[in-house]
Amino acid sequence: MNVLISVSDKAGIAEFAAALVALGFNLLSTGGTAKLLQDAGLPVTEVAELTQFPEMLDGRVKTLHPKVHGGLLARRDVPAHMQALQEHGIGTIDMLVVNLYPFEATVAKAGCTLEDAIENIDIGGPAMVRSAAKNWKDVAVLTDAAQYAPVLAELQANHGKHGGRLSDKTRFGLSVAAFNRVSDYDAAISDYLSAIDFDASTGAAAPVLTQFPAHSNGRFIKLQDLRYGENPHQQAAFYRDLYPAPGSLVTAEQLQGKELSYNNIADADAAWECAKQWDVPACVIVKHANPCGVAVGANALEAYDKAFKTDPTSAFGGIIAFNVPVDGAAAEAVSKQFVEVLMAPDFTPEALAVFRAKQNVRVLRIPLDGVQRGGDTDWARGHNAMDIKRIGSGLLMQSSDNHELKLSDLKVVTKMAPTEQQLQDLLFAWKVAKFVKSNAIVFCAGGMTMGVGAGQMSRLDSARIASIKAQHAGLSLQGSAVASDAFFPFRDGLDVVIDQGASCVIQPGGSMRDQEVIDAADERGVAMVFSGVRHFRH
């Protein structure tokens, strides 16, 4: 049996090739890979010797030859194919091991030139991979070093039986993985080249890339089929990005509980992304995609107790996220309510023991170790770089709302300036409002939400609902801070939140009637700051 090995990433290949030789495989290889195998003391035939045609054009042409592709594509069960091979002196190739030029890694480097990008577009590799994958019944094709160990284990288990071959199921799986890899590779090339502004790039050291390429290729991997979608009559599945951001929901490990539902996942993502905003212990409770309780505290237990007080009614059957490990004390408190999903970076053994008595609770561990809070990209900081919304026969793409407001960004517009404590409450309220469906009004005080008004067509109604929620929870809004996700178009919305007890307000500003609203704040004796940023969420 013959195996052709031609890899860009050579990690583990010498060991894998040695094991194949021990199983009776003959090694064929190219260029640097052949030299590596020879240096490892392995018997190897170079492809140039096989084809009797030298590598040329700086290695651009070396495997594009009938003696390679004929050996990969010939069907062993078709006599005419085998006769053609015999007539032309072509041997069969039973396994192909290829990983492609590192195009994705090359273009990700700062200052990558167009020439560097083009030179890292693999031609011969994908061609061989497609040939081998098409002929999966006779050829095994490996495109990832992670496949070496399981393939070798199966070959060793079958050595001396079943013809020493891999099973049909394994070869088919390898074929599908190979076509997926080629598809992802071509999509990366398409995305990159389609994003180049050719005119703007003329004379530049590196290409000028537009944020939105002319041709966009989605690349997602299915994690699981779901019982149903948003409603029982809808079908659904859960996918992740090809390269998920560190600390994102799709990296979660489910430790116990029922299978996640479509709505569980959507709500869990909202809770988790909201909780990740804080550097101090925080707890977020979400119901129907809106935070119904958010708080920070000295530890997980205090943060939870404060978050739960905001709206105990809505918290029933909610989704809970902590940005710090959950210990036994916090677990005991959470276990007293009905919770659908619980997320945290980790859980102590005591906490897990508490939830073992509630086996239906879905417990997710999502490590935050890889998140770089000061990272230079959204991805490094654990966020999506892009948001996508489906519309009829199309989609909308936008950069994600990852804006982080700082104290220095605030503009005091009233005669009365907020105190240091009020500024902290305003920033806290602003972080929460970012995750509340528009129109959003959020009352906060002392590092916790006091009332949340979400998703109303009128900002006035959102303000009223927030105050009603606080009243039902037995919370006083006197002296509270209020965040509005968008500007107050008239003073009436401001008057409503002040009537309920607000002493300071944060809003984006930008209305034609800003001065009217500012004058109203001065008249009512409250402090107001403009953020200069709107946080619509639909």
Image (cartoon, rainbow, N blue to C red):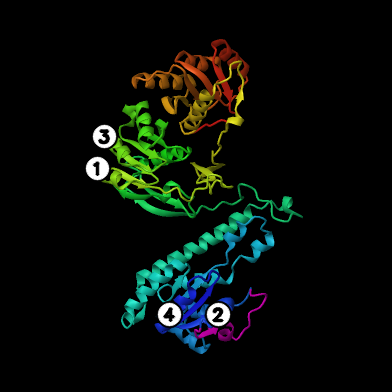
Query: Residue 396: percent from the left, percent from the top?
Result: 54, 42
- The answer to whether the residue labelled 1 contacts the one labelled 4, judged by CB atoms less than 8 Å apart, is no
**Between tags 3 and 2, which lies in front?**
3
Q: Which residue is mark 2?
A: 34
Where is residue 491 drawn, in percent x and y? Answer: 55, 15
Query: In this picture, is 488 found above or below 393?
Result: above
Q: Are marks 4 and 2 in contact (CB under 8 Å)?
A: no
Q: Nearer the viewer, mark 4 or mark 3?
A: 3
Residue at coordinates 67% horizontally, 56% vertically from top-left? Answer: 111
The numbered mark, 4 or 2, whose residue comes first in the sequence reads 4
Q: Is residue 51 above or below residue 468?
A: below
Please, what secondary structure does the residue beneath circle 3 have?
loop
Question: From which residue to which does the magenta span run?
Answer: 41-59
Q: Is residue 148 above or below residue 68?
A: above
Q: Earlier in the sequence, mark 1 or mark 4?
A: 4
The vertical placement of 350 against 10, above or below, is above
Distance of mark 4 from mark 3, alpha carbons?
A: 57 Å
The N terminus - image quarter: bottom left
The reply to whether dot 4 and dot 3 touch (C-beta < 8 Å) is no
N-terminal label among 3 and 2 = 2
Disc 4 or 3, which lies upstream in sequence? 4
Q: CA distance from mark 1 to mark 4?
A: 49 Å
* Secondary structure under the numbered disc 4 in the rendered image: helix
Pick the residue in front: 201 or 13.
Answer: 13
Mark number displayed over residue 327: none
- Which residue matches tag 3? 336
> Disc 3 and disc 2: Cα gap in Å?
64 Å
Q: Residue at x 42, y 28 (%)?
A: 448
Q: Secondary structure at mark 2?
A: helix
